[in-house]
Image: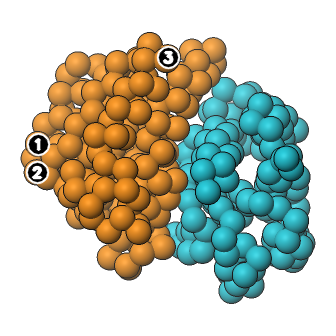
Amino acid sequence: MNIYVINGPNINLLGTREPEIYGSETLDDIEKKCIEQGLKDSHSVKFMQSNYEGEIVEWIQHAIKENIDAIVINAAAYTHTSIAIHDALKSFSGFKIELHISNPHLRESFRHVSYISPVVDAVVAGLGPSGYSHVIQLLTELKKQYNEA
Amino acid sequence: MNNNKLLIINGPGLSDLSNFNDYGYEPLTLEKLQNKCLETCKSLGMELDFFQTDDQASLIKKIAEGAAECDALIINPVGYSHESTFDLDAYTSNIKSDTLKNKPVIEVHITNIFHDNEGISEPVIVSKSGVGFICGLGVHSYELAIRSIHEKLNHN
């Protein structure tokens, strides 16, 4: 499987930004684990981060063009604001998972609305940094399941 | 060494899973779901108490009673958010109890509960108290929750 893991604004500060919420692992640590986990199941994992909304939209469009199998997206703060990312994801027909390190529903009320949730297959939140590699691990089984069905 | 004990609570309506056919377990049954959870727990060396009730009062009672005996909780409260009869306060206060305070709690749903939103509005009130939240992965919502809890319990 070809998998895009797309990360939104401020996630590059992971490990230093509010470690009591997001943990002390850095984005590099998470990327390494995702790629390692992917290799176990012969997935190609492309791990990306941007602070720019438009760049994220372009990556999703690229995923559409390249027939990528799955997108795991942590749109961070854009989750709660971006109709552009909502629209782009809508046009992607592969498997889509919205991921958050913390659980936005337990935090400030401005984080309670997600423009992403209605256009993805699944939402995973609050599992900490290891949520990423757990999700990558699961994608193999989900794929198997769909192939058998 | 004692095995970690996990409690999984399934709420009203989950006795019949025949509507959930999109997830490769056609037809999905509670028994298949339970077996899948047992299999995952066994492979991780965890004990499992798998519980389902169609009665809201029993659901809330089980959270209170079960919490004392388990190391972690996975709960599928189903449609509490759109059932006006559901006692959300009782539910929330039981999940926020001292017994569960330092234990991992993950709310799971089989389907993506945000799909039914008409337009983009504030989603249903979910996970006000739980630590984690997973929806839309079918039986794998449970599997992901179990794996994540196992990791949490063994890293602390």
| Marks 1 & 2, CB-CB < 8 Å contact | yes
For the point 46% across and 36% down, which residue is it?
A133
Question: Residue A46 sits in which quadrant?
Answer: top left
Task: Single out the residue that lies furthest toward the front.
Answer: B1
Label 2: which secondary element = loop
Q: In this view, does B59 lie to the left or right of B142?
A: right
Discs 1 and 2 lie in a common subunit: yes
Q: Of tags 3 and 1, which is closer to the observer?
A: 3
Q: Colour of chain B?
A: cyan
Q: Which of marks 3 and 1 is nearer the N terminus?
A: 3
Q: Quadrant of residue A19?
A: bottom left
In space, the residues marked 3 and 2 are separated at their CA atoms by 31 Å
SS of the residue at dot 1?
A: helix
Q: What residue type is labelled 2?
A: Tyr
Q: Which chain carries label 1?
A: A
Question: Residue B74, can we see it?
Answer: yes
Residue type, numbered disc 1? Glu
Residue A116 locus on image (x, y percent): 34, 53
Residue bearing mark 2:
A52
Question: What residue is pinned by disc 1?
Answer: A55
Q: Do we see residue B108 in this rendering? A: no
Q: Which mark is residue A41?
A: 3
